[in-house]
Image: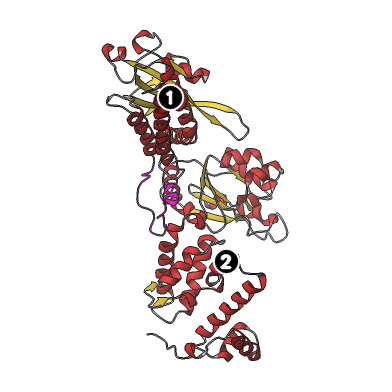
Amino acid sequence: MTRNGLTERVDNIYLSTLSEILDSVAPHHDLEPSLNAILEVLSKDLHFPRAFLAIMDPESEKLKLSITHSPAKDYTATYAPGKGVVGKVYETGESVIVPRMSDDDQMLNKAFNRSEEEQKGLSFICVPVVRIDSDGNQEVIGALSVDSPILPMDDLQEHQQFLEVVAALISNQVSRLQEEMSLHAQMLSQGMMPGAADAPPPADFVATSKSMKQVLRQARQVGPSRATALLRGESGTGKELLAEAIHSCSPRREKPLVKLNCAALPAELVESELFGHQKGAFTGAYQNKRGLFEIANNGTLFLDEIGELSLDAQAKVLRAIQEKEIQRVGSEQPIAVDVRLICATHQPLEQLLREGKFREDLFYRINVFPVFIPPLRERREDILPLAEKFLDMFSGEYSKEIKRISSPAIDLFTQYHWPGNVRELKNCIERAVLICEEEVIRTYHLPPTLQTAESTATDTSLSFGEAVAKFEQELLVDSLKKARGNMLQAARDLRVSYRIVNYKVKKYNIDVKKYAGAKKKK
């Protein structure tokens, strides 16, 4: 085979290997199994006897052999920065190739107990894993290394370049794993064991999609610690429910979980609600009042929409976190409090920071463990389980014998974009249960927004007038179905005159009689 033919074959191997690796770096995949799979792919496709990752441990400031694919069983090893090949790569940020292990004095051979004979037949390649932050700053957070059969230097350099590409692809995952290592160490330092990440979800928590399983796993990880969690996501995604899940797997589960929506109160009342007030502190303060920090003492305080707090209130919240004490409004007497804080927001706090509307020091105090909850439209596997859960709940609450959701209605659920997320889905099911007098939720029990979502949102061939007419027709048919063909009742439901309904029925050639024969099902 010619050199060009060999190069083409090698390039094809790199491409196929890269394709397999890309399948494993999706953000919703679990970190360790995903990185393990990548190392296994490298070993299998490129014939590396070993592949392993050493990650910088922020607590010990040493590189720890964290993940490996190797026939050896002894994986325990740490590397000091600058010591040995791995330590040198970490310190300099430069890749290193060792053509023959037995010829290099810097090969420490710490992890795998390679024999002298084995080292004579192996090369070693080590490349840095670099994290790049939002400002473009680079930080080496680990090293990706492989044992390779002895090869010409040109081939080893090609392997090195490919491994540098792989290291760049996995840098985000390695960074997240590094954060998990740090959190794990923090929990152990507090005498706690990390929560069972794969334990079943709480009874009222639906996590069918991979992305929500990851969210629940993060909740299980942070729950047993004192760390402040910041729950982020659009309105209606379930941040309050997730806060309850975090509290339920914490050592404070027997203590109160106190909640405050910071957007629900005027700014001048939020401080009194959080910190309490003394009698006479302001007009209307007729008696002493405990604040939520006092009520939540030894428990958990959930501050929803924390981005709505005034700068003064933010400063006091920061003091309460740092000093573990508060002062009631109108009092100079400090009160000691021990509160675990969970915060939530749908706002871009980073933008509020730039605008001077949110304190930078508070942001870094509450952003210890951020959890991003995806919108419902990005986790459609959860739609039907959630709908069925709400159906059971509201059928029981309103004493209805509704057994299922029809297939056409399910299709509408999965096609709709759910701008209001889980909250909108819950309201939709409650409305359907209230008006349903059958054993099945059908399309005409759903709000018009769902019934027309597919035609108005996806049929771009319609003109504006045609889209309006189609929407109008759907509304009319929906009302006639509910009124069982009674145009007078349909007119009342639509809040228009009988004459208009009669005109529209003729305009759209709607057969009212086919709705008149519908009977109630028991």
* Residue 217 badge: none
Find numbered disc 2 in the image and state the secondary structure of the residue it sits on: loop
* Residue 459 badge: 2
Residue 203 located within the stretch drawn in magenta: yes
* Position of the C terminus by quadrant: bottom left
Q: Position of residue 42 (x, y in %)?
A: 37, 30
Q: Position of residue 408 (x, y in %)?
A: 44, 71
Left or right of 347? Residue 295 is left
* Position of the N terminus by quadrant: top left
Left or right of 251? Residue 72 is left
In the image, 274 versus 234, the foreground residue is 234
Q: Which residue is label 1 attached to?
A: 4
Q: Find the magenta span and give its range.
A: 190-214
Question: Which residue is depicted at the point 65% across and 54% down?
Answer: 270
Residue 287 located within the stretch drawn in magenta: no
Considering only order in the chain, which callout, 2 or 1, is on the residue closer to the N terminus?
A: 1
| Disc 1 to disc 2, C-alpha distance | 51 Å
Q: Is residue 465 above or below residue 188?
A: below
Question: Which residue is depicted at the point 58% across and 91% down?
Answer: 488
In the image, 293 versus 80, the foreground residue is 80
Find numbered disc 1 in the image and state the secondary structure of the residue it sits on: helix
Tag 2: amino acid: Asp
